[in-house]
Image (cartoon, rainbow, N blue to C red):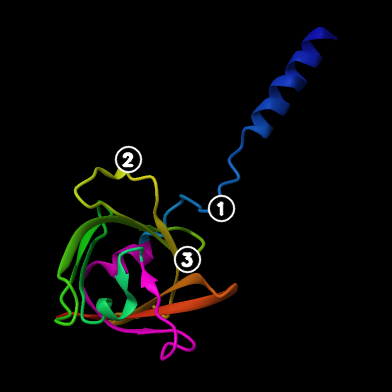
Amino acid sequence: MKKVLILMGLILSLISCKSNSPVGTKLDMKTEVALKGDWILTQVSYPNSQYVKITSFDLVDSNCFVGSKWNFISNNNKGSFSLTNDACSLYSSNITWYVNKDGRFVMKILDAEKAKRVGTGYVLDLINVTETTFQLVDHVDVAGKNTGVTYQFVRNN
């Protein structure tokens, strides 16, 4: 009887230790390969953008990302981006990224830090992926309302 109770206790402890992380870590390799290469962020859009300013990725005004250049390397999930908008401060950073099985794009901005030391990141919806375009949608709080900010990317040939 003791063995049965011990076995049941072990099984329950294993089940209770299962991760319930909201960001899946299983990768969607096919989509990652589709994103491999150089891209230009051509448009940032969200409702009431003419009245409300949004800071993208806790860095700068979202309009500063228009024209930015992005590189995604799918075999090691690294990459980089550079802000090139003349109306804004120039900025560039390395990133780590992946696409999980839920179709979410998960990214950390490294800023000369190693990925394991960066405690924050961004989880965006990845939609409308084609050979030449894709969109990332970030959900941000604007005046207490969940607002989707859409980043439109076009392949840079």
Residue 116: give x, y in percent of width and height: 32, 40
- The disc at residue 103 is 3
| 118 within the magenta span | no
Name of the residue lying farthest toward the top: 2
Could you tell me which residue is drawn at 38 percent across and 45 percent down?
119
Left or right of residue 44: residue 139: right
Judge by depth and name the residue closer to the eye, 147 or 79: 147
| Mark 3 / mark 1, whichever is N-terminal | 1
Task: Report the span colored magenta.
Answer: 30-56
Residue 123: give x, y in percent of width and height: 44, 61
Alpha-carbon distance for marks 1 and 2?
Answer: 19 Å
Left or right of residue 119: residue 143: right
The residue under label 2 is 116
The residue under label 1 is 22
Residue 17: give x, y in percent of width and height: 62, 32
| Residue 145 in which image quadrant | bottom right
